[in-house]
Image (spheres, grey):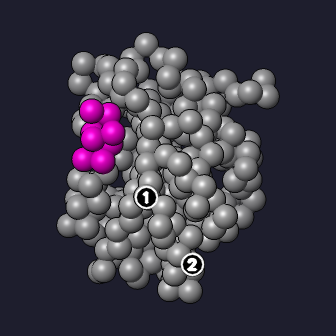
Amino acid sequence: MKVRIPTRDGNAFDAHLSLPPGNKGPGVVMIPEIFGVNEGIHRAADLFARQGYVVLALDIFWRMERNVELGYDEAGFEKAYALHAAFDYEQGVADMGDAVEHLRAMESYTGKVFVTGYCLGGTMSYLAAARLDVDGAAGYYGTRIHNFLDDGPRIDRPLMLHFGRHDHTTPPELLTPILEAIDGNANVTNFIYEDAGHAFANVMRDDTYMPADAERANARTFEFFGRLDG
């Protein structure tokens, strides 16, 4: 189901809504990979919904093109990379903040609100914990965190980060400064999955999906959000 989210500058954009059993619960704003709100994100949103969350998966590229939904073929990758290259993270954070406030006003929302995301969304989760009024965030294999290292010490909301040791988007020369930027910040917990690469939690990617690592990461995220909501 799609819902329309108004923005502070007088526009509006879409989000995919997944509701939990009973149709009420704490909220999760989900930021997709660079492929948009496709089947993989629908499945991720439904997974969180089964854990009891009201989930809004955001059409984060809407200011360039609405309702992006790409596959993992050559054409999908080419377009995804182009959209990501043009994406304005600062504006994206503002749109994410509008989605957080919209979720809080929904009748189905109770409790607290969290942010999660994958790839581009992993970076956005990191930024949410540093810049937005959220109750917690969990980022999966964020690809541009290294561009926002100054935010690391300023993170004042609980944040969990999941990285694959063999992620080509965060090789050692990029992952090391990320870990240094968050080192000593008691609000941040990180996990590195030694056998995993990028997109290890994407059930639609046979070339990257690591079921055991995905299950461990998701269990940690669910326990983390549940503890914060308790």
Residue 118 in the magenta stretch? The answer is no
Query: Could you tell me what secondary structure mostly forms the magenta stretch?
Result: helix
Q: CA distance from mark 1 to mark 2?
A: 17 Å
- Three-letter code for the amino acid on which mark 1 is drawn: Ala
SS at badge 1: loop
Asked if residue 187 lies left or right of residue 47, the reply is right
**Residue 114 found in image quarter:** top left
Which quadrant would the N terminus be assigned to in this image? top left
Disc 2: which residue: 177
In magenta, the rendered stretch is 223-230
SS at badge 2: helix
Disc 1: which residue: 186
Q: Are marks 1 and 2 in contact (CB under 8 Å)?
A: no
Residue 229 in the magenta stretch? The answer is yes
Q: Is residue 196 above or below residue 112?
A: below
Mark 1 vs mark 2: give the one in front.
1
Asked if residue 83 lies left or right of residue 209, the reply is right
- Three-letter code for the amino acid on which mark 2 is drawn: Pro
- Mark 1 surroundings: few (<14), some (14-19) or many (≥20) residues within 10 A: few
Q: Along the line of sight, which residue is nearer the eye, 106 or 47? A: 106
Residue 203 percent coordinates (x, y): 31, 58
Q: Along the line of sight, which residue is nearer the eye, 113 or 73? A: 113
